[in-house]
Image (cartoon, helix red, strand yellow):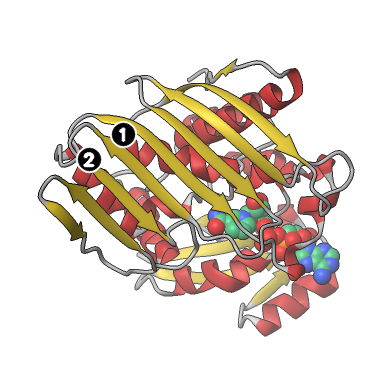
Amino acid sequence: MTVRWGLIGASTIARQFMIDAIRNQPDGEIIAVMSSSADRAAAYARENNIPKGIDSLDALLSSDVDAVYISTTNELHLEQALAAAKAGKHIMCEKPLALTTTDARKMVEACTTAGVVLGTNHHLRNAGAHRAMREAIAAGRIGKPVAARVFHSVYLPEHLQGWRITKPEAGGGVVLDITVHDADTLRFVLGDDPVEISAITQSSGMASGGLEDGAMCVWRFKSGVIAQSHEGFTTRFADTGFEVHGTDGSLYARNVMTQKPVGSVTLRTEKGEEQLAFDREDLYTRSLRAFHAAIRGEGTPSATGEDGVWSLASAEAALESAKSGKTVAINPGL
Ligand code: NDP
């Protein structure tokens, strides 16, 4: 059975990655794109070879699409997801799921009630590098994990220097943009949930409107593992990376906090160093494959709605901590 997709949002991420990821599925087809502007819908449909450009959510949801991919700006995800669930459509939603954890939980509840699949597009847990790290840790190769470090400060490309750095009301800021990914990747790689976070943020010159363009967070996990993460939009020459240090070994991943299936993972133990092998499949294509399987009743999306609630609860706690100067408990309320 073909999964007929409707895109909600004429976005960059759909154009760069998700349209291809859907078309890479043997049973995936895109039949329409919705934009708030009729002209943009038509132009986007034409440029991306999509049969229909639509400028109304109702029209998209009353068409014969089976699933929708929501990649509008963050303040719109809630309303669009609730409407899609009500219309019986499966939903792959971009992160952050919503602007608040409470709203994200509403989305999960609505999808459960409607019996539709909800996935959060946390692409990083689909990366071969992160799966190799998770497997090595689960297999005990570093002993008991003690601490982790995430380096995820990048330079926001000029073509994306819009709402992310100017519009708090659209859910801008580096914490809702990147800390959510770090929360999800830490949870996935460690196989553990965070319990509290302490964060300091900065506005170092790129972001305006009270938004932050840099953040440093310190996390504590249920098992006792502590972690630090650095998210940023303004560091033009910084590398990304992810380290996990255990009682019997350390994992050093480099150039892995990215949208591409690249980078390396080194395991260091008393025996020396070993490069871990991992597959180089496109992250978004793998994510879509799991989503299609979940629609067929086989397994779950690689990141579920609940995972999206967790990552948003972490980001929300980070923002609260940055404001109050206190360590804040992370409570997804699930
Ligand atoms: P874009 O800024 O490209 O698109 C967001 C919205 O902006 C679109 O839905 C569109 O509205 C509007 N828009 C786009 N171009 C124009 C234009 N020229 N003039 C006026 N409006 C325009 O956002 P991104 O693709 O960067 O991000 C979209 C979502 O995806 C966000 O939730 C973000 O957090 C997430 N994201 C996730 C990534 C991941 O790897 N998981 C990576 C990047 C983003 P309309 O649809 O009404 O035309």
Q: What residue is pinned by disc 1?
A: 191
Q: Nearer the viewer, residue 7 or 121?
A: 121
Q: Are marks 1 and 2 in contact (CB under 8 Å)?
A: yes
Residue visible at 76% across and 79% down in the picture: 43
Q: What is the quadrant of the N terminus in the image?
A: bottom left
Q: How packed is label 2: few (under 14 Cα within 10 Å), some, or many (20 or more)?
A: many
Whole-percent x, y for residue 5 in the image: 53, 63
> SS class of the residue under badge 2?
helix
The quarter of the picture showing ligand 1: bottom right
Whole-percent x, y for residue 225 in the image: 36, 26
Residue visible at 37% across and 48% down in the picture: 302
Can residue 91 be seen in the rendering of this structure?
Answer: no
Q: What residue is pinned by disc 2?
A: 137
Please give left or right for residue 310 compared with residue 135 in the image: right
Q: Nearer the viewer, residue 140 or 333?
A: 140
Q: Can you say whether 224 is above or below 314 in the image?
A: above
Residue visible at 15% across and 37% down in the picture: 140
Q: Nearer the viewer, residue 255 or 183?
A: 255
Q: How packed is label 1: few (under 14 Cα within 10 Å), some, or many (20 or more)?
A: some
Q: Look at label 2 and name its amino acid.
A: Ile
Please give left or right for residue 255 compared with residue 199 in the image: left
Whole-percent x, y for residue 312 in the image: 58, 33
